[in-house]
Amino acid sequence: MSSWESAIIDADRNKDWRDRLKASISDIKWSDSLQPIVDKIKANKQLDVEDGCVLFETNNLNELGHLANLHKIAMFGNNAYFNSNVHINQTNICVLACRFCAFRRGPKASDAYAMSIDTYLSELDKFSSFVNEVHSVGGLHPDWDVDHYCDLFRKVKEEHPHVSIKALTAVEIKHLSQVSNLSIKDTLIRLQDAGLTSLPGGGAEILDDDVRQIICNGKESSQEYLDIHETAHEIGLPSNCTMLFGTIETAKQRVEHMIQLRDLGDRTQGFQCFVPYPFLPDSTRLPMAQLSTGQEILRVIAISRIMLDSIPHIKAYRMNIGDSMAELALQYGADDIDGTVKQESIMHLAGSKTPLDYGVNQLAKLVTRSGNVPVKRNTTYTQFEEFVPAKQPRRLPVF
């Protein structure tokens, strides 16, 4: 199996991807609605809100997916990425009560929990021999400050030095800074010094404060989300970024969300992956939410790839959309399916049915079925290995 490395700013994206894209889209007869957008792309002009709305209104989903897939191929060829990771949600106790969240519990709830550092390490012990990343997000525990997480991260690195730590959403960073009476920058620096590798980017929801007031009142504002990630990027902490769609937002608000992230990515080059995922309605308190169809999921993923030229990777988050949809999304502009996960609470409490027992061989086969080449990556998209799934033993015919 071949292996290679990439600069963190490139994240394995071809340096000449724009030229490759121009060559691939120039000789295709596009529909009247897409041709002006293709012309802007060929002229190296970024798409605006009006363009994004046109993409959402385009009737031909296959044509939209084809344009997105050509972007993906120009950037990464036929590579599609995954990693070996485990999710450990450290607490479900939260001082907020977001209406879309099925995970949060009050401190007196019978099923509320808060893992001690020893319990967390015991959970990680079960998986550390075959993962290289732990992904941890959770509730805003009223008593946990930055010292608690610094102690946790140091212990993780002492006992599992090969495991990178992708942890804490922007609102968790804000909460820790307030509880600890520190600035956002000082909070992030202390966490980074303790072993934090990157931020997962969760909690963006929709970067429109009118929407946020309804679905997640009390969380960080849209600008705070952007400012926290900009600060992280400034000190050398890369991050993902996300979008929760299918609650109450409009198509225009989705596009404006993407453009705000794209603009920040232009400035900092610190976003590595965009993760759009649909709202899962089970067990939540948002009855007015829209339900995203399979076509809508593919449309959002395709538009994300076309709009977000400053963010290298687009993830088809299989924990949310399921394996079949993730496999299809790899032909609609996505190039990453996350990882093995092994255990996860937040999405599954909200209604996800995606299996948690997949190993790297099963993920590689999912990628192969989509017509792509499976590539195992590290957390920060700097180390890569082409992964060949193990062959299954031949079964004798049954007569």
Image: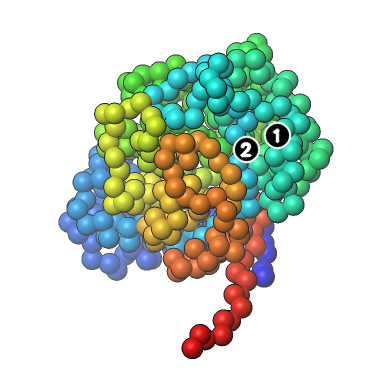
* Mark seen at residue 322: none
Q: Which mark is residue 88?
A: 2
Q: In screen coordinates, is 24 left or right of 357?
A: left
Circle 1 Cα neighbour tier, 10 Å, few/some/many (<14 / 14–19 / ≥20): some
Q: Residue furthest front?
A: 399
Residue 292's x, y, as percent? 30, 43
Residue type for callout 2: Ile
Q: Nearer the viewer, residue 123 or 268?
A: 123
Q: Determine the image quadrant of residue 214.
A: top left
> Mark 2 near mark 1, Cβ–Cβ under 8 Å?
yes
Q: Residue at x 82, y 38 (%)?
A: 158
Left or right, 258 with reference to 169? left
**Quarter of the image where one finds residue 173:** top right
- Is residue 299 at all visible to an observer of this figure? no
Where does label 1 land, which residue?
120
From this viewpoint, which residue is outermost toward the top? 181
Left or right of residue 196: residue 375: left
- Height in image: 384 above or below 102? below
Residue 211 sits above or below residue 353 on the image = above
| Amino acid, disc 1 | Tyr
Tag 1 secondary structure: helix
Q: How is the image coloured?
A: rainbow
| 2 or 1: tag closer to the N-terminus | 2
In the image as oriented, which residue stretches furthest toward the left? Answer: 32
Q: Is residue 29 above or below residue 307?
A: below
Residue at image point 29% right, 28% down? 287
At 67% from the left and 64% from the top, the residue drawn is 3
The picture places residue 170, in percent across and down from the top left corner, at 54, 27
Residue sitting at x 53%, y 20%: 109
Crowd band around label 2 with a 10 angstrom C-alpha radius: few (<14), some (14–19), many (20+): many
- How many numbered marks does the figure carry? 2
